Image (cartoon, grey):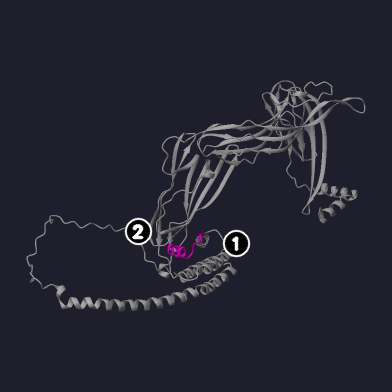
Amino acid sequence: MNSKLLKYHSVFKRPTVIWSMLVLLNLFGMNLDAQDKFVASGPKVVALGEQFQLSWEVNGDGSNFQAPSFDEFTKLQGPSTGSSSSVTIMNGKMERVEKYTYSYVLAGKSEGVFEIKPASIELNGKKLFSNSLRIEVVKGQSGLRNNAGAQPSNKPTGVADDDVYVRVELNKTDVFMGEQIVATLKVYSRTNQIQFTDAKFPQFDGFVSSLVSDVPNTLQRENVNSEVFYTGIFKKLILIPQRSGTLNIDPFELSCNVSVQDGYVRDFFGRSVPRMKTLSLNLKSKARSVSVRTLPGMQPADFNGAVGQFELSSKIDKNQAKTNDAISLKITISGKGNIKLIEPLKISFPSDFDSFDPKISENIQVDERGSSGSKSFEYLLIPRYAGEFKIPAVTFSYFDIQQGKYVSKSTEEYTISVEKGEGDSQPAMMSGSVSKKDIQLIGKDIRYLKDDTKLTRKGSLFADSGLFWTILLGLPLLLLIVLVVRAQQLKAGQNVTLMKTRRATAKARSRLKEAESFLKTSDEKKFYEALLNALYGYFSDKLSIPMAELNRDSINSKVILHLADESVIKQMNELLDTCEFSRYAPVSAKEKMQEHFAAAVSLVQEMDRKIKSPK
């Protein structure tokens, strides 16, 4: 308890202060719970002749309370009234809470389901009506069966097998692969005097499972074969089978302590009263199995295992762009089924577009009806050449359980007009292609023999001439001259390459300082441009790649020659992808700039340490 709470605690020990504050609260109407509430509560299931309580609670001092009729029940007691009031202070704000309760004790006369009509009360000048209640009266008893009709004795009573047990309940056991199953791990007890100590849940091998969160966390009364049981749900899951055949589900095991009657004893006044003891129980459900069928018929080419009912939509942020501008294409799949398992769709983007792995976002709800919601794939595209390009329609097929067949959906086709951007020195690319025709000679299969043939005297060949011998003897000398000149050129080139390699780190450090200056000013666009410039400049100098040939393929091929460390190569490619994406991404990446800068510095240091000299 902190000092502030201690201060309030000590203040409220003084009765004068308490009464003063209550008076002020009444005068100024300081009640944060301004909405009037009038709520009825009671059990859903009772045994025939069992006594139970109905209560109505209102958050204020109302008047003229009118209870409904209880013709179907025997009224044993009521109305009993009670009230409570509390004052709480939180964050310096004072709140007064008042509750008034009206209660009745009833018992069921006959079996059936009966409705308790709403009650009414007047509060703050308004007439409020409560909710109605439905109460089921069953013939079976309430409580442990072994205690029924027990007479005073010292013989201990036990717990029958059907007094307390656990089950794995499945809403279906014969399904298609990918179809959703609702599994409920549940305990049944004739008494609510039970305490759970340990549980071992099934693994659900062969299934993908998702937990249903909105389940009650208290014991509820329930009609089980016309008897009253207290039931509790430990887990409710959505199971999706991933292979065909028979899939087995292990038992659900639960340890608990149950209070049972162990005869009678005499109290101080000589009266006979029940004696209670606690029994430790280890419960185990029956194993379950599910028959999983393969999906029928011929599967469409674009089918990737989606089962359920889905819709497909797409959205592109622009149809006109300039080279090196970012384009965002978003594909959304929505509906009910195994939506969480749907993978990115196959899309044939133009070869002159740079595309990145999609950003995946989910809005999926899991309830007792199954998984539903939407899953989106957002692709970042960067056109590198001018022209007119088409992004073809995207198709998506799924198996509809209700219809028992495959259903295909498709998006629209997009046409992107790309203009040459400022500062782009790359030539514009023709949107069409030129087809070459083979040259065919028709009717000219037989050619005429030449009629100007000249004959040469025998023995007067070129191989015997002086020119032939001059050329033959001069070739070695010419080859020697070429080799000497080439060696000098290679030596000069190596010196230049070696100098560039040695200066690569220094130049990278200078470029990284420029990127760091944009980092300090939080200029994202200039920061990532400077960071990419530093990295590509370093690769060009360190790996001796001319700027005209500098691209991802040439960098990877050179790095692989110098490094056998795949982790560094992977780190390099991931960093380049991240920087490219962050450079064009519409979502702000300021919180990641420092991390990307540190990764770039680390990469340069690592490569500088491992790459000693060019090969």
Quick one: label 2 or label 1, which is nearer the N terminus?
A: 2
Kindly tell me whether residue 116 is visible in this rendering: no
The amino acid type found where label 2 is placed reads Ser
- Residues 130 and 390: in front is 390
Tell me which residue sits at (14%, 74%) in the image. 464
* Residue 592 position within the rendered picture, expressed as x and y whole percent measured from the top left: 58, 61
Q: Which mark is residue 591?
A: 1
Would residue 218 be found to the left or right of residue 183 on screen? Answer: right
- Residues 542 and 223: in front is 542
Would residue 490 be found to the left or right of residue 232 on screen? Answer: left
Would residue 223 be found to the left or right of residue 78 on screen? Answer: left
Q: Whole-Å distance between the Cαs marked 2 and 1? A: 40 Å
Indicate which label's residue lies in the foreground, 2 or 1. 1
The amino acid type found where label 1 is placed reads Glu
Which quadrant, please, contains the C terminus? Answer: bottom left
Kindly tell me whether residue 449 is visible in this rendering: yes
Q: Is residue 141 magenta?
A: no
The stretch in magenta equals 552-566
Q: To which quarter of the image does residue 156 belong?
A: top right
Is residue 19 shown above or below 141?
A: below
Local packing at callout 2 (Cα closer than 10 Å; few below 14, some 14-19, many 20+) is: few
Q: To which quarter of the image does residue 365 belong?
A: top right
Q: How many numbered circles are shown?
A: 2
Is residue 434 shown above or below 250?
A: below
Is residue 535 shown above or below 154?
A: below
Q: To which quarter of the image does residue 515 belong?
A: bottom right
Q: Is residue 565 magenta?
A: yes
- Residues 501 and 18: in front is 501
* Residue 212 position within the rendered picture, expressed as x and y whole percent measured from the top left: 62, 40
* Residue 269 position within the rendered picture, expressed as x and y whole percent measured from the top left: 93, 26
